[in-house]
Image (spheres, helix red, strand yellow):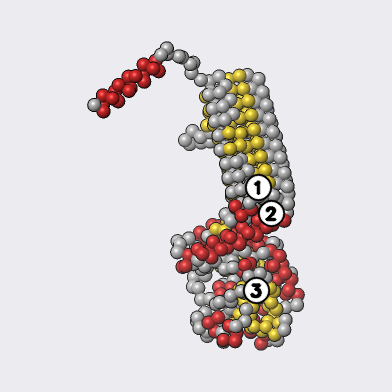
């Protein structure tokens, strides 16, 4: 059965105290809406429809950057969840598959949960995702009879007996498209909020003799973000889950509570991640690599046997082949380092290709930017770059070539050559002592 995702993303999020649309606030380096889309895409949907309102242009940009095939509908009035889903009626005209309704401010929903939810429609007309809440608070309640869902009641409209129940509504549901829009045509806004509740379709379906079911998940998975406090809690839950997954999958982390993952971080088994490491988006660390303490990685690929850090920074486009060593206070950007290359201390390598087994001395800088354009530096296999070398790009250093410490290299260095690019040293006899005496005399005169 084909699947269409309908993701509600129109809310302003007043309690966020922000000009940014609520669904664009980030968890683990990605907007909450992207988290929801990623989970939904695990179902291989035929359609993905975003219902947007506040900040629609910004939301559209994020959606299209993540999934150019996603469809975008503007909800000009926010009259409740039922009204929001109904905005997709014309777009889904003729679609006979299943519709999964998701929320752009619920970033922790899991792919496996959605697969279970969708599969349940083989024996249910409408299936709602529910959870047992420790403190049900103001959540809507799921009213059941044995295994069947009879109706959903919003907190404002619930009786005291219904409020005492702790099976709560997440808002996420699955229903066949033709039935969904038939039921939406029957609901009204005669309730405490004067809104069209999507949840009312359950009672309408039951009234028609249809079977409705509940699929249960953990409470944390359904966390909706409405404030900065909620956002911090969602980040905490995400990080806790990813750390547990990494440990389970064979990653060693001496202090896992200090490691910060991105939404798409991949780390292979037998890798070691030390304390206070931060992963930005787009990082892959292969099996057996070691990321040492206080390093920051983003958009980087670290191969087997590499050692990175401590206090290293890998920026987007950093590609490390096997057994590369990146040491303390080294920054790598948009560069390929071949097998066994070493950059151990206090260096910047940007827009460069470093050959196998090349050694980059402390304080080396690839001077890649002329104020307008970036330029490339090429260093050959087994080359040795002396400490404090400035490589003014575009420039190349050949295989087994060397640069003398303190050199400024502005021309290509052929293979096997030694390049010396520094001023001739001169020693002025006793000038240091004479100069210091003169300076002290000037200072003393000013005091007098």
Residue 134 drawn at (x, y percent): 61, 74
Looking at the image, is mark 1 or mark 3 nearer the viewer? Answer: 1
Mark 1–mark 3 Cα distance, whole angstroms, equals 34 Å
Which residue is depicted at the point 65% across and 36% down?
325
Q: Residue furthest right?
A: 122
Q: Is residue 56 left or right of residue 128?
A: left
Counting other residues with Cα less than 10 Å from the Cα at mark 3, is it few (<14), some (14-19), or many (20 or more)? many
Residue where numbered disc 3 is placed: 131
What is the secondary structure assignment of the residue under circle 1? strand
The relative height of residue 74 versus residue 390 in the rendered view (above or below) is: below
Q: Residue furthest left?
A: 448
Mark 3–mark 2 Cα distance, whole angstroms, equals 26 Å
Residue where numbered disc 2 is placed: 246
- Please state which of residues 123 and 14 is positioned toward the viewer in this rendering: 14
What is the secondary structure assignment of the residue under circle 2? helix
Which disc number belongs to residue 350? none
First-in-chain label (3 vs 2): 3
Residue 254 drawn at (x, y percent): 66, 50
What is the secondary structure assignment of the residue under circle 3? strand
Q: Can residue 16 be seen by looking at this rendering?
A: yes
Which disc number belongs to residue 273? 1
Residue 322 drawn at (x, y percent): 71, 38
First-in-chain label (1 vs 2): 2
- Please state which of residues 293 and 418 is positioned toward the viewer in this rendering: 293
Counting other residues with Cα less than 10 Å from the Cα at mark 2, is it few (<14), some (14-19), or many (20 or more)? many
């Amino acid at each position: 059965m084909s699947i269409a995702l309908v993701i509600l993303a129109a809310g302003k999020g007043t309690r966020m105290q922000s000009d940014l649309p609520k669904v664009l606030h980030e968890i683990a380096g990605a907007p909450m809406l992207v988290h929801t889309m990623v989970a939904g895409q695990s179902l291989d949907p035929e359609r993905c429809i975003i219902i947007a309102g506040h900040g629609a242009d910004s939301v559209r940009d994020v959606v299209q950057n993540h999934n150019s095939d996603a469809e975008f509908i503007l909800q000009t009035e926010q009259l409740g969840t039922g009204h929001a889903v109904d905005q997709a009626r014309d777009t889904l005209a003729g679609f006979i598959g299943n519709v999964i309704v998701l929320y752009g401010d619920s970033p922790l929903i899991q792919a496996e949960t959605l697969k279970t939810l969708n599969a349940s429609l083989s024996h249910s007309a409408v299936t709602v995702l529910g959870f047992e809440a420790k403190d049900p608070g103001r959540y809507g309640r799921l009213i059941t009879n044995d295994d069947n869902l009879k109706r959903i009641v919003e907190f404002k409209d619930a009786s005291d007996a219904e409020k005492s129940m702790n099976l709560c509504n997440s808002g996420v549901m699955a229903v066949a498209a033709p039935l969904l829009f038939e039921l939406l045509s029957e609901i009204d806004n005669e309730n405490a909020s004067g809104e069209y509740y999507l949840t009312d379709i359950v009672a309408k379906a039951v009234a028609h003799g249809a079977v409705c079911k509940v699929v249960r998940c953990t409470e944390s998975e359904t966390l909706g973000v409405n404030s900065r406090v909620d956002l911090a809690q969602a980040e905490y839950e995400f990080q806790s889950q990813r750390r547990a997954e990494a440990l389970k999958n064979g990653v060693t982390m001496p202090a896992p509570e200090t490691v910060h993952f991105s939404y798409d971080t991949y780390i292979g088994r037998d890798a070691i991640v030390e304390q206070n490491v931060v992963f930005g988006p787009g990082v892959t660390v292969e099996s057996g690599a070691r990321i040492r303490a206080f390093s920051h990685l983003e958009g980087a690929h670290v191969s087997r046997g590499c050692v990175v850090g401590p206090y290293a920074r890998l920026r987007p486009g950093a590609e490390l082949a096997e057994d590369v060593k990146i040491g303390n206070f080294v920054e790598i950007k948009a560069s390929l380092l071949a097998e066994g290359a070493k950059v151990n201390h206090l260096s910047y390598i940007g827009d460069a290709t470093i050959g196998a087994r090349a050694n980059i001395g402390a304080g080396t800088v690839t001077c890649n930017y002329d104020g307008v354009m970036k330029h490339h530096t090429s260093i050959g296999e087994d080359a040795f770059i002396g400490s404090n070398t400035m490589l003014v790009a575009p420039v190349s250093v050949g295989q087994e070539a060397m640069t003398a410490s303190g050199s400024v290299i502005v021309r290509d260095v052929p293979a096997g050559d030694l390049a010396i690019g520094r001023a001739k040293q001169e020693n002025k006899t006793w000038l240091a002592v004479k100069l210091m005496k003169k300076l002290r005399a000037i200072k003393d005169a000013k005091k007098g």
